[in-house]
């Protein structure tokens, strides 16, 4: 039952008619504290339709930035949860450099919690959001451009290998 629901969702998200909305939703969710990467979705949409390069990059940046803003507001309201961490070096570093630290919101593993901590410290929202957007835009542009230089034969071989592995497991 769960497998069929996941397959249905993946099929829906892969549909060309909802490609950009899928990119937005996946980018938004991946910017929250949930572990999900959005670069494969962005790459898949662009690979399927190269004319969608800039729209996909911009939609992913918007979704990921809004997800970062959600993290910011969670942190803004979550003082009690972080009370023990107040003495850590992260807080001193964030307080020292302010909203500019949101440029690092793109870094895997630390970027999303960084947005949350920025909200907890009540860093100025609009500058923080602007720096988040710049960092996330740079990540999508760099990662997608790099992935587009990988030959199609590599992706085909990777897909076949993963398919064979999947069939071995199930």
Image (spheres, rainbow, N blue to C red):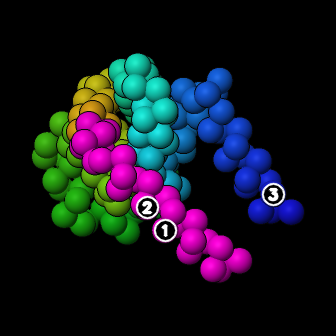
Name of the residue lying farthest toward the front:
153
Residue 158, which numbered label?
A: 2
Is residue 64 or residue 4 the one in the foreground?
Answer: 4
Q: Which residue is at a point 43% across and 22% down the rendered structure image? A: 52
Q: Is residue 169 left or right of residue 39?
A: right
Q: Is residue 151 above or below residue 53?
A: below
Location of the C terminus by quadrant is bottom right
User: Which residue is drawn at the image coordinates 62% and 38% (left, top)?
Assistant: 14
Give the spatial CA distance, label 2 vs label 1.
Answer: 5 Å
What is the x, y in percent for residue 137? 29, 31
The answer to whether 23 appears left or right of 144 in the picture is right
Q: Is residue 107 above or below residue 65?
A: below
Answer with mark 3 or mark 1, whichever residue precedes in sequence: 3
Residue drawn at 40 percent across, 26 percent down: 50
- Quarter where residue 59 is shown: top left
CA separation in Å, label 3 and label 1: 22 Å
Magenta stretch contains residue 37: no
Are the residues at dot 3 and dot 2 in contact (C-beta closer than 8 Å)? no
Segment colored magenta: 144-170
Q: Quick one: 116 or 143, which is closer to the camera?
A: 143
**Residue located beneath label 1 in the image:** 161
Give the residue number, with chain letter if any, for mark 3.
4
Q: Secondary structure at mark 1?
A: helix
In this picture, residue 52 sits left or right of residue 146: right
On screen, residue 87 versus residue 79, left or right, reads left
Q: Is residue 155 magenta?
A: yes
Separation of marks 3 and 2 at Cα, in angstroms: 23 Å
* Mark 3 or 1: the one toward you: 1
């Amino acid at each position: 039952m769960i497998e069929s629901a996941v397959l249905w969702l993946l099929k829906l998200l892969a549909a060309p008619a909802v490609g950009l909305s899928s990119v937005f939703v996946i980018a938004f969710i991946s910017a929250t504290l949930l572990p999900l990467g959005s670069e494969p979705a962005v790459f898949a949409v662009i690979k399927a339709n190269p004319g969608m390069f800039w729209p996909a990059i911009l939609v992913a940046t918007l979704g990921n930035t809004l997800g970062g803003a959600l993290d910011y507001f969670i942190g803004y309201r979550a003082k009690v949860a972080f009370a023990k961490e107040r003495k850590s070096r992260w807080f001193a570093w964030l307080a020292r450099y302010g909203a500019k630290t949101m440029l690092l919101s793109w870094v895997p593993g630390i970027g999303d919690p960084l947005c949350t901590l920025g909200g907890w410290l009540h860093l100025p929202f609009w500058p923080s959001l602007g720096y988040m957007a710049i960092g996330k835009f740079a990540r999508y542009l760099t990662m997608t451009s790099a992935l587009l230089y990988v030959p199609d034969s590599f992706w085909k071989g990777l897909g076949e290998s993963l398919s064979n592995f999947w069939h071995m497991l199930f």
